Amino acid sequence: MADVLQTTFGDSLLSDLLDDYIDKLPSPEALKFKVLVKNKKIGTLKETHERHGFNKHGKVEELEEEEEQEQEEEEEVKEIESYDNFLTRLNQETEMEEKKTLPITLFKKKKVRKIRISLALSDLVIYTKAEKFKSFQYSRLYQQFNENNSIGETQARKLSKTRAYEFIFHTKNFITRIYPKATRADSSNFNPQEFWNIGCQMEYLKQNNRWLDFMALNFQTPGLPMDLQNGKFLDNGGCGYILKPHFLRDAKSNFNPSKIRDSNPLTLTMRLISGIQLPLGNSSSNKIDTLVIVEVFGVPNDHMKQQTRVVKKNAFSPRWNETFTFIIQVPELALIRFVVENQGLLTGNEFLGQYTLPVLCMDKGYRRIPLCSKTGESLEPASLFVYVWYIR
């Protein structure tokens, strides 16, 4: 595998430390056009650097790792921690570090197993070393800058509610990967928005992997999570990188997606005027009963949904002329999704098309909103016609 990676990617494969990034993560600019390998790793970065250029073909070494648990572990403390209590614990840890009285271990030792790893493959892991998550406190005290944690969906959701300040503090310093729970055997996806809200960058993906400020998902499974994923990256020209909002990067920020303080809300008002050549779905004629659902995704308080009336027997040029207003507390994290449906009284509504984009990417004035299929393909010329204006 190491040979294949090196042959395929050549100089694009990051196989050694960058000169200016010996003890910190590189910027996206420094890693532009580079391919990074994320895997388990043997030894330190210094040892890897010293072996660079040597022939490691066929060499294998053993690595000890904790055995995987059948079920995700429960967090010991179940109460929701306040920001003041979190700051108190941080200050205590700083004092312990200054006095050199840090505890040797913070948890009970678990059963370990030995695994064999190719040294050549291990040495291709530079800034993305896979490291099992133990606790936020352990990471603050002992985790190295190039170590990436993996947290299960269930545990991550629980921590995001009970330890939101600590979770955001963690993602300011370490790349964090969220993976789906074991019961998702059908490749279904979790909603990535809840983990974007706390700054997570990297997620499990069966067909592709990207590390940046987004949730990687099962790309083979269409639906709402994939619509949000595709819409998120319309920002910044779809280049693959989105800078987190300042409150998810600022070390002094006390942002909590469930407890919004001192926000600068945005009032988004739009008039949904009409539709243009809407898809027909399973119908053989354009005489279907169309409606539009407009939904905002973001922090919990910003999740809102509004719906037009049904226009009977018209998919070619339905007119709604309805005005909607959304008061959005954290527009930097908000996405807006337009879904067109065919009303079905007995079998339920039929999905016809959708489009999702970041709220702050919407321009004022008269706008045409293109529609995409369930699997993300363009449905041109199908679109919606709206008039948009903001009030701060």
Image: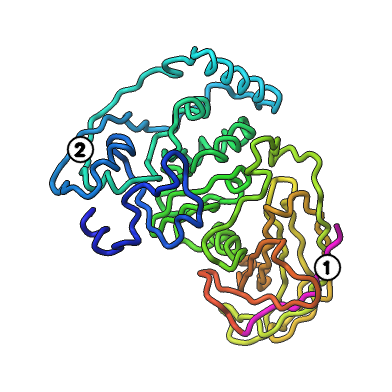
Where does label 2 land, which residue?
A: 116
Which quarter shows the C terminus? bottom right
Q: Which residues are magenta?
A: 381-392
The residue nearer to you, when weighing 27 against 298, is: 27
Which quarter shows the N terminus? bottom left
Report, in whole angstroms, how far the alpha carbon at label 2 lies from the one at label 1: 59 Å
The residue nearer to you, when weighing 70 against 247, is: 247
Residue 165 location, quadrant: top right
Residue 234 x, y percent position in the rendering: 60, 66
Question: In the drawing, does residue 207 fall left or right of residue 375?
Answer: left
Residue 253 x, y percent position in the rendering: 69, 37
Mark 2: which amino acid? Arg
- Dot 2 or dot 1: first in sequence order is 2
Q: Is residue 382 above or below residue 21?
A: below
Mark 1: which amino acid? Trp
Q: Which residue reaches farthest front?
A: 19
Question: In the drawing, does residue 208 fall left or right of residue 212?
Answer: left
Question: Which residue shows up at 48% across the image and 54% down it?
Answer: 216
Where does label 1 land, which residue?
A: 389
Q: Is residue 351 above or below residue 381?
A: above
**Magenta stretch: includes residue 103:** no
Question: Which residue shows up at 42% across the image and 56% down it?
Answer: 209
Residue 320 x, y percent position in the rendering: 80, 76
